[in-house]
Amino acid sequence: MKQTVVSTIVRALLCCATLMLASCATIPPPAMSVDEIASFKLVGVEVHGVEVIRSWPVQEKRFLATNADPEIARRLPDESAQNFPVVQAFFQAALQRMFADHLEGALAPVMRGARPVRAVVTLKQFDVPSVVRRVLIDQYAKIQLTIDIIDAKTNALLISYPGPYHQQWLFGGLSAPIADAIAADYDPENTLIANYILDYRTWLVTR
């Protein structure tokens, strides 16, 4: 019986991962043609704006598992991650890996040429509420990005994508601690990032 309940909740979590609300604004397609974009070769990914992250529970747990500072271990669960530069640096490294993996995988079929470009990701919003916030006031993971394609040789801006706001509902109220315990290392931001990058790829090739 317990296994059935757990499976049902996990399935509900996964289903919620696909139910994201986005802003209704339409982003004009890039001025460059699909053929011009195909001449690019992605050679690097940069991530900026990590200071906007207030909390990111999965990564905070991973940070604390390697942290040797008892003062940070005591304060981080109850404070904003913005108060801890070392935690922000940990987030930066995690985001660098995640965006590099997603962008390289998504853009490989689109950018098949030899002109080297970099993708510069700037976080406008990026937040996963803690369990306490989910119990009391906030049940949404959030993301909004700008993605710029920069010429790697001249640093010229080639394409800019002012991405929309996306959010994903999470279990809140008294169910939040139970859902969090069952979900373990499930990270809603990984799903949000993956879908955001897929939407970006679609934007690049759709006219």
Image (cartoon, rainbow, N blue to C red):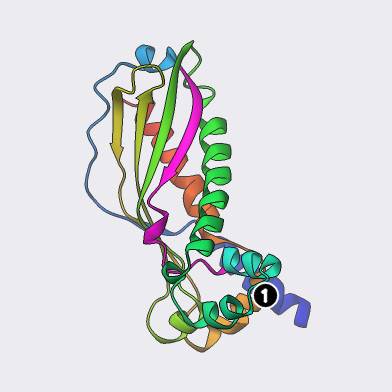
SS of the residue under disc 1: helix
Quadrant housing the N terminus: bottom right
The one of 178 and 111 positioned closer to us in this rendering: 111
Residue 184 placed where, x, y %?
A: 67, 70
Q: Is residue 47 magenta?
A: yes
Query: Does residue 192 sit above or below 1 in this rendering?
Result: above
Q: Label 1 amino acid?
A: Ile
Residue 115 appears at what percent x and percent y?
44, 12
**Position of residue 34 measured from the top left corner of the image (x, y, whole percent):** 36, 17
Q: Is residue 1 visible?
A: no
Q: Residue at x 30, y 36 (%)?
A: 161
Q: Is residue 98 left or right of residue 21?
A: right
Question: Magenta region: which residues?
Answer: 41-57
Depth check, front residue: 117 or 21: 117
In the depicted view, which residue is nearer to us: 197 or 46? Answer: 46
Residue drawn at x 49%, y 10% is 114
Front one among 150 and 104:
150
Judged left or right of residue 122, residue 57 is: right
Picture residue at 49% right of the left edge, 60% below the top:
88
Counting labels gives 1
Q: Would residue 202 be seen by someone viewing this image from the given angle?
A: yes
Q: Is residue 32 above or below residue 198?
A: above
Q: Is residue 22 above or below residue 55?
A: above
Q: Is residue 39 left or right of residue 23?
A: right
Residue 112 vertical placement versus 123 (above, below): above
| Residue 95 counted in the magenta span | no
Q: Residues within 10 Å of mark 1 (few under 14, many from 20)?
A: some
Q: Disc 1 marks which residue? A: 182
Q: Position of residue 108 (x, y in %)?
A: 54, 24
